[in-house]
Image (cartoon, rainbow, N blue to C red):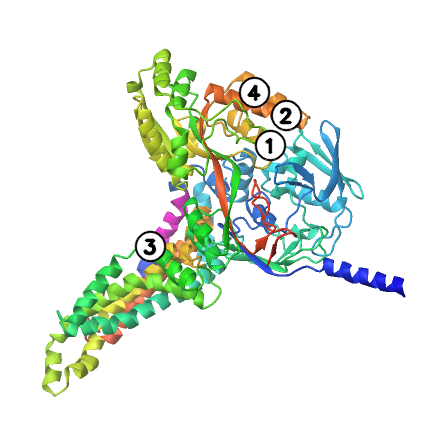
């Protein structure tokens, strides 16, 4: 009798702990569904942040790759990886996750009309179920960052039912803690708790994503309590939100740099002395204070202090006009002969201010600068072809892969697809190739740091500030913290009092 | 009246053709490669994979010659098929229909309230030129005309959503969602309607038939009510039609700030997303409707004022 009582009490307690709290959370996105859930598009990010999409791996908040729908992986030869699929996972349509479903989802990704860059045929040649719960992925070239690529929202694993129509249909097709019940591409996505979620109790009963294009309206909605989480509120709204009762601002270091790209492919910036002179003439600390209220710190190299690939010998530059003038003289360049132009884009409103500050700073060493603010699509051809002098850019360096190899390679290698700097140095390319092939993560991160140092020393680009972003959340929300790559918002742990 | 309709119909066809050409060329006019531009609107990273851009170009048919793309679109459009949105993959006509419904409700609410306020205010101001009501009206008109929507909209959110907590800040989920955007939208039309009513009523009140009505023993108020308002409201009908047509696609700022899924926001997002079929369909719908609305206004003008019958041909 006593044993029976203990057993039933234990069962009751277990039942109580398994019972989810309930509650509803709404969070805002600034753009709606723009490509009918095509995996390559940012729609995948929306579904991932909504707690619907999950991949074989995930990126933790300290930017390390962790198992998710895969429990482990092994590189069995230079181009082949084997992933063990997690047991006991169900899709929201009731079907089971197994190797066949994973192989189907990833093969659909490879065969998509428009490939996703994180997992495209340029990177991966085949995906095969080699056992009931084992999947082999073969890459085109040896690639050490494949597990990180599989964490990209574009590489989420959906049930076979998701594919086949126009685009991808995520309704009932995810494995995540939240299930999409309905959506309006321009208005909202409605979600309910997935009761059979493999990852434990889901605290919230339901959730909603609302698409609010205006940043100030998003800020207002947190203050009124209409939404509980607003992503990426403007810096100028931070003080008001912080002062509002029941709302908090959460600061996050974004893996993103605001930089001044210099055209290394033509005079005068084909001369390292001129590049260094310009770098010394720009006061990044002043830009940080004047434009960002000091929230985004002045940058030295491309990466933020504290990141594993940050180079400690690349501090923010101390402005030194005498040295800048001396460098120009050493280069044999008369600053009065320099009439240069800075390009910027209107959607990044801060770029106009930064351009004006740089214009004033460079005039102090005699360089005349004009400013052109234009739509990105209209100036991009000139930038890519090297028909420009200087350009302001806000550049993320952990997109698709949670390591900066993608950015370093695209932006600074001779064959880089985004080499706006027009920089080409075979020595740098060799360093890059060695870093990309390094299997030991710590050694690889050090190699990235050395590449960053090289860019810093050569003044290929002038790095201005490491960007800080702000999310706003109701004080009643617990379990939410901004993700560095902005991959996740809703999770089983997010709850509301 | 038939002449008006026929004339307007011809203008409609010519305008629709010109608009279709302009809408088709818009993505090209903004410079750069349209396929890259579309891709850039869909992914947050500006470093695009060249193979993805080429695949998107093929998928959207942008690899075909321009003339072939245009003729193919025109052929379908003539049969009422505006194709599928690049962004949502839903039929353009259905998306436009839905957005137009929202914009019509918003525009009619804003203009309806504006009219209800403006007609009596303008009439009262006209009846006592230089009086207190006239002074107040002039001040009000000047204030409202000088009040930008992009300023008033956030201020109204601050007051009614944040401070008072009466109304939702944004969205289109209940009738309360309509109030703030309609308030912000009605300011300028209300000012113009009041001004036009005042001016028209000034003319009407000096007309011989008002003097005759007064001579027959009617009070000023009776004369205005029975003979003045009908004639004085005619210019307002034209203004109402112009504003209505304008607001259907022109309330972009308000629809973006308040996240209203109307035509303004639809077109704004189509521009941002380089959603060419949506832009083409949306432009054609807006221009077509503007001409239809103005034609109806002209017809109404003739109906209200019998004196115009037979002479009104423009």
Q: Main secondary structure of the magenta part?
A: helix
Residue A351 appears in view = no
Q: Are marks 2 and 1 on the same chain?
A: yes
Task: Confirm whether circles 3 and 1 share one chain.
Answer: no
**Is B121 placed above or below A245 here?**
below
Circle 1 SS class: loop
- Residue farthest toward the bottom in the current orientation of the protein: B217
Tell me: residue A10, above or below residue B124.
Answer: above
Residue at the image point whose x is 33% and y is 15% from the top? A333
How crowded pointer 4 is (Cα within 10 Å; few <14, some 14-19, many 20+) is rated as: some
* Pointer 2 with pointer 1, Cβ within 8 A: yes
Q: Nearer the viewer, mark 4 or mark 1?
A: 1
Choose the circle earlier in sequence order: 4 or 2: 4
Q: Residues within 10 Å of mark 2 (few under 14, many from 20)?
A: many
Q: Which residue is mark 2?
A: A444
Give coordinates of residue B221: x percent, y percent. Answer: 18, 81
Chain holding disc 4 = A
Seen at 89% across and 62% down, the residue is A3
Residue at the spot of label 3? B151
Which residue matches tag 1? A403
**Residue indicated by mark 4:** A429
Q: CA distance from mark 2 to mark 1?
A: 10 Å
- Of tags 3 and 4, which is closer to the observer? 3
Contact, CB < 8 Å: mark 3 with mark 4?
no
Task: Give the SS element for disc 2.
Answer: helix
State the quadrant of the C terminus of chain A.
Answer: bottom right
Q: Secondary structure at mark 4?
A: helix
| Mark in front: 4 vs 2 | 2
From the top left corner, tell me how far across and down residue A19 is, in percent: 71, 60
């Amino acid at each position: 009798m006593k044993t029976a009582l203990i057993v039933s009490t234990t069962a009751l307690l277990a039942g109580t702990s398994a019972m989810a709290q309930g509650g509803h959370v709404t969070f805002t996105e600034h753009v709606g569904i723009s490509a009918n859930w095509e995996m390559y598009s940012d729609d995948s990010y929306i579904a991932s942040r909504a707690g619907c999409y999950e991949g074989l791996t995930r990126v933790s908040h300290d930017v390390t790759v962790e198992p998710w729908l895969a429990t482990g992986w092994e590189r069995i030869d230079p181009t082949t990886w084997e992933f063990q699929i997690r047991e006991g996972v169900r899709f929201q349509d009731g079907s089971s996750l197994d190797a066949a479903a994973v192989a189907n989802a990833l093969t659909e990704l490879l065969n998509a009309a428009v490939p996703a860059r994180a997992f495209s045929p340029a990177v991966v040649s085949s995906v095969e179920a080699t056992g009931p719960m084992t999947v082999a992925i073969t890459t085109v070239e040896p690639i050490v960052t494949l597990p990180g690529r599989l964490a990209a929202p574009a590489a989420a694993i959906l049930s076979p039912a998701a594919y086949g129509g126009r685009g991808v249909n995520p309704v009932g097709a995810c494995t995540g803690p939240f299930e999409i019940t309905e959506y309006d591409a321009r208005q909202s996505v409605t979600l309910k708790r997935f009761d059979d979620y493999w990852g434990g109790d889901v605290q919230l009963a339901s959730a909603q994503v609302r698409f609010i294009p205006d940043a100030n309206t998003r800020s207002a909605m947190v203050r009124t309590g209409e939404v509980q989480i607003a992503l990426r509120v403007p810096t100028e709204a931070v003080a008001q939100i912080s002062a509002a009762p029941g709302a908090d601002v959460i600061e996050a270091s974004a893996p993103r740099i605001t930089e001044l790209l210099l055209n290394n492919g033509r005079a005068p910036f084909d001369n390292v002395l001129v590049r260094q002179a310009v770098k010394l003439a720009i006061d990044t600390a002043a830009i940080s204070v004047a434009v960002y209220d000091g929230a985004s710190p002045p940058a030295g190299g491309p990466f933020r202090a504290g990141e594993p690939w940050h180079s400690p010998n690349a501090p923010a530059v101390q402005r030194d006009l005498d040295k800048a003038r001396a460098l120009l003289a050493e280069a044999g360049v008369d600053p009065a002969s320099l009439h240069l132009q800075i390009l910027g884009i209107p959607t990044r409103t801060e770029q106009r201010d930064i351009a004006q500050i740089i214009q004033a700073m460079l005039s102090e060493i005699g360089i005349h600068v004009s400013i052109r603010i234009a739509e990105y699509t209209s100036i991009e051809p000139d930038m890519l072809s090297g028909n420009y002098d200087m350009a302001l850019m806000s550049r993320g360096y952990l997109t698709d892969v949670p390591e900066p190899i993608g950015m370093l390679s695209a932006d600074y290698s001779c064959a880089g697809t985004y080499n706006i700097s027009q920089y080409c140095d075979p020595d740098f390319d060799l360093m890059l190739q060695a870093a990309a092939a390094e299997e030991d993560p710590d050694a690889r991160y050090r190699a990235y740091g050395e590449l960053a140092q090289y860019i810093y020393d050569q003044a290929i680009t002038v790095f201005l500030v490491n960007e800080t972003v702000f999310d706003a959340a109701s004080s009643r929300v617990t379990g939410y913290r901004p993700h560095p790559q902005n991959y996740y918002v809703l999770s089983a742990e997010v709850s509301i009092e | 009246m038939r002449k008006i309709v026929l004339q307007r119909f011809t203008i409609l066809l010519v305008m629709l053709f010109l608009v279709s050409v302009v809408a088709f060329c818009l993505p090209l006019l903004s410079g750069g490669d349209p396929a890259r531009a579309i891709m850039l609107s869909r992914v947050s990273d500006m470093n695009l994979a060249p193979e993805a851009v080429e695949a998107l170009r093929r998928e959207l048919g942008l690899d075909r010659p321009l003339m072939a793309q245009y003729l193919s679109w025109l052929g379908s459009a003539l049969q009422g098929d505006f194709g599928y949105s690049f962004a949502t993959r839903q039929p353009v006509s259905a998306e436009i229909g839905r957005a137009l419904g929202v914009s019509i409700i918003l525009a009619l609410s804003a203009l309806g309230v504006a009219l209800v306020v403006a007609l009596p205010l303008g009439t009262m101001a006209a009846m006592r030129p230089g009086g207190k009501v006239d002074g107040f009206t002039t001040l009000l008109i000047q204030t409202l005309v000088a009040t930008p929507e992009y300023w008033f909209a956030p201020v109204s959110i601050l007051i009614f959503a944040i401070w008072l907590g009466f109304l939702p800040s944004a969205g289109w989920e209940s009738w309360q969602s309509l109030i703030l955007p309609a308030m912000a939208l009605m300011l300028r039309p209300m000012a113009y309607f009041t001004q036009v009513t005042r001016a028209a009523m000034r003319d009407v009140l000096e007309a011989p038939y008002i003097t005759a009505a007064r001579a027959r023993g009617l009070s000023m108020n009776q004369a205005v009510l029975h003979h003045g308002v009908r004639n004085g409201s005619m210019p307002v009908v034209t203004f109402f039609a112009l504003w209505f047509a304008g607001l259907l696609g022109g309330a972009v700022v308000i629809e973006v700030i308040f996240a209203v899924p109307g035509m303004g926001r639809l077109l704004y997002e189509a521009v941002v997303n380089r959603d060419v079929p949506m832009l083409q369909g949306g432009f054609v719908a807006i221009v077509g409707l503007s001409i239809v609305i103005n034609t109806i206004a002209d017809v109404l003008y003739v109906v209200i004022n019998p004196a115009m019958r037979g002479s009104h041909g423009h």
